[in-house]
Amino acid sequence: MENLPRTPFLLTDPPLGLDPRDVRRLVARRAVRRVLRGVGVRADVEDSVLLRAQAAALVLGPGQVVVDYSAAWLHGVDVGPGRPGHGPDVLDVASVAGRRATRHSGADGCRRTVAPDEVTPVHGVAVTTPLRTAADLACRWGRGDAMAALDAFCRQHGVEAEAHRPMIARFAGRRGVTQYRELVPRIDPRAESSRESWLRLTAHDHGFTWLEPQVDTWVEGYGWARLDLADRRRRIALEYDGAEFHAGDQQQVDDEKRRRAMVREGWVFVIVRGGGFVEPALSVWVGELRAAYDDRSREPCRRYARGEGAGRHPRRG
């Protein structure tokens, strides 16, 4: 493996005289990993936007622009129904200026109208801009993934709600624009993962509009604690525990310790786990959240004087 280059290469056209059988063996041994369909790189080379662009350049043809999930991937936004964190199986590309859609086996081609100011180079590769990419995904993806994309592009590239207004007007009549228009006012860059975006959107869809993302609060005997979504006034927290993140690991232990401390302080937790966005699990946690609000509505909300706690706990650094 030491003789392999540290840049991506076509698996069907391996470097240094290796034949495809050698490459297949290296892939099977995990000495080479696939970046895109038909494109590999040494397994010890770290992922980066530059690496992704170098891989895309091997597949992209003239007059083609990377779009959709692959464009988000090249912008470093790993969200959506593809393979977050692992790259797309094939490169989503659009042929512009009247060119034919690509037939390359490593690319999923289409024809699309893309204005010149909606294309930007990413390490020399033509990609739709963050704004245009977010707009396309908001129209093409399901609501949860679309919300996650809009949040992520706002968080990572500063594409705020106001920037979408001209694009919404331009997309008038396009399939999916109604969803796009509806979701833009809900953009919130504080969501730290796609599932947090899903959770906030689903809660709001069921009428729980008081929940705020990434709430920091001081807990006596514990310290500062951060919550995925919370209603500070009613002390209700809604959090997502994905099995991919919390399967008996240290994070799970830390979460349980934090939650026990907060329950002692009067907080109520509703926990959503993997599969919680479809029935019957969806109705279960929505019912738990509604019950928590019903219980808190029957007791007086705690009222705080301005600056309560000043001098009793440190400022959040």
Image (spheres, grey):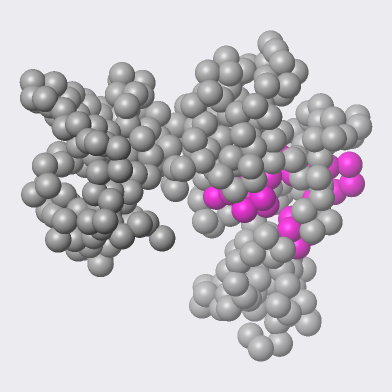
Indicate left or right for 70 with 245 as reference.
right
Compared to residue 316, the image places residue 197 above or below, namely: above
Q: Position of residue 193 (x, y in %)?
A: 44, 47
Would residue 6 be seen by someone viewing this image from the given angle? yes
Q: Residue at x 64, y 57 (%)?
A: 36
Write the residue at 77% across / 45% down.
127
Q: Quadrant of the C terminus?
A: bottom left
On the image, the x and y values in percent for residue 72 come to 63, 45
Q: Find residue 272 and report its horizontal and vertical position in percent.
A: 25, 40
Between 240 and 95, which is closer to the camera in this rendering? Answer: 240
Which range of residues does the magenta coloring cover? 53-78
Depth check: give the residue in front, 138 or 222: 222
Locate residue 187, reporting x and y percent. Answer: 52, 31
Quadrant in which the N terminus is drawn: bottom right
- The answer to whether residue 12 is left or right of residue 242 is right
Q: In the figure, is residue 264 to the left or right of 25?
A: left
Q: Is residue 258 above or below residue 96?
A: below
Task: Let me know if residue 101 appears in the view.
Answer: no
